[in-house]
Image (cartoon, rainbow, N blue to C red):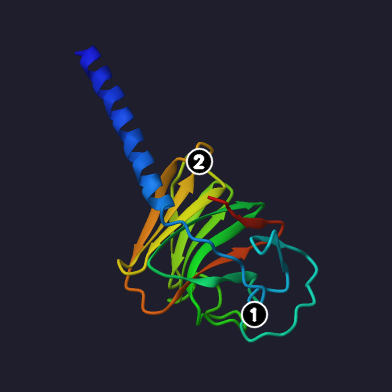
Amino acid sequence: MCKTIDFIKICFGQFSSKIAICVSLLLFSDACNITLDPNTAHTQLVLSDEKRKIIHVTEPQPYPDHPERFDSCEQVLCVESLTGRCYWEAEWSGKGAEIVVSYKDIRRKGVSDCWFGYNDKSWSLYCCANEFTIWHSNVSNNIPFPLFSNRVAVYVDVSAGTLTFYSVSDTHTLTHLHTFNTTFTEPLYAGFAVYADSSVSLCQI
């Protein structure tokens, strides 16, 4: 009996691994190339690596005034809109960051309704030491996750109305964190909030 159980466990483990590989390949086929929009970046965020990395700095940068710039929240949006099915990965380091999908018409000036996840314009995954929290419409939910990773994957299916966050391991195994189900009514953009002593990089896939 024990040998039978062990055999089933081995087969199930192999089957699960094959499923995980197939899911990863399907997601990778929808990989998109996105870049950060300097006109939206808060003055304490510095963009580098061909607009694929954000670093939070202490000293405000002398960026020109722009109607799309976040003037109070340390946030930035990407240039390209998300259409169809889109997949990307980001890696963060430091004290904390948010990986986000947002409508473009999210407020940029002041604090009220500007923070990602605190309004109905954005969906956020907050990442800090050993903790993930999802936010939307100022409602949060902690995600228990024992195997923590600093790399996150995002998959959006616009027509299906799904937004899914995954944790990405060192062996590039995807672990589901949360899926939002909704009806998207406006163009979507990837975004990031980066806190003190932290950075976020868009990953090559």
Q: Quadrant of residue 120?
A: bottom left
Left or right for 92, reference 105 = right
| As drawn, 149 above or below 52 | above
- Classed neighbour count for the residue bearing mark 2: other residues with Cα under 10 Å, few (<14), some (14–19), many (≥20): some
Question: In the structure shown, which secondary structural element does the residue marked by tag 2 occupy?
Answer: loop
Question: In the structure shown, which secondary structural element does the residue marked by tag 1 occupy?
Answer: loop
Q: Residue at x 55, y 73 (%)?
A: 115
Residue 156 in percent (x, y) is at 40, 62
Choose between 143 and 35: the one closer to the eye. Answer: 35
Q: Which mark is residue 69?
A: 1
Q: Which mark is residue 90?
A: none
Amino acid type assigned to the residue bearing label 2 in the image: Ser
Q: Quadrant of residue 181?
A: bottom left
Q: Residue at x 24, y 13 (%)?
A: 3
| As drawn, 44 above or below 171 | below
The numbered mark, 1 or 2, whose residue comes first in the sequence reads: 1
Residue 45 in percent (x, y) is at 70, 67
Choose between 44 and 50: the one closer to the eye. Answer: 50
Q: Residue at x 43, y 73 (%)?
A: 137
Residue where numbered disc 2 is placed: 169
Residue 145 in percent (x, y) is at 45, 44
Amino acid type assigned to the residue bearing label 1 in the image: Arg
Q: CA distance from mark 1 to mark 2?
A: 33 Å
- Residue at the front extreme, as displayed: 29
Left or right for 6, reference 112 = left
| As drawn, 184 above or below 30 | below
* Cβ atoms under marks 1 and 2 closer than 8 Å: no
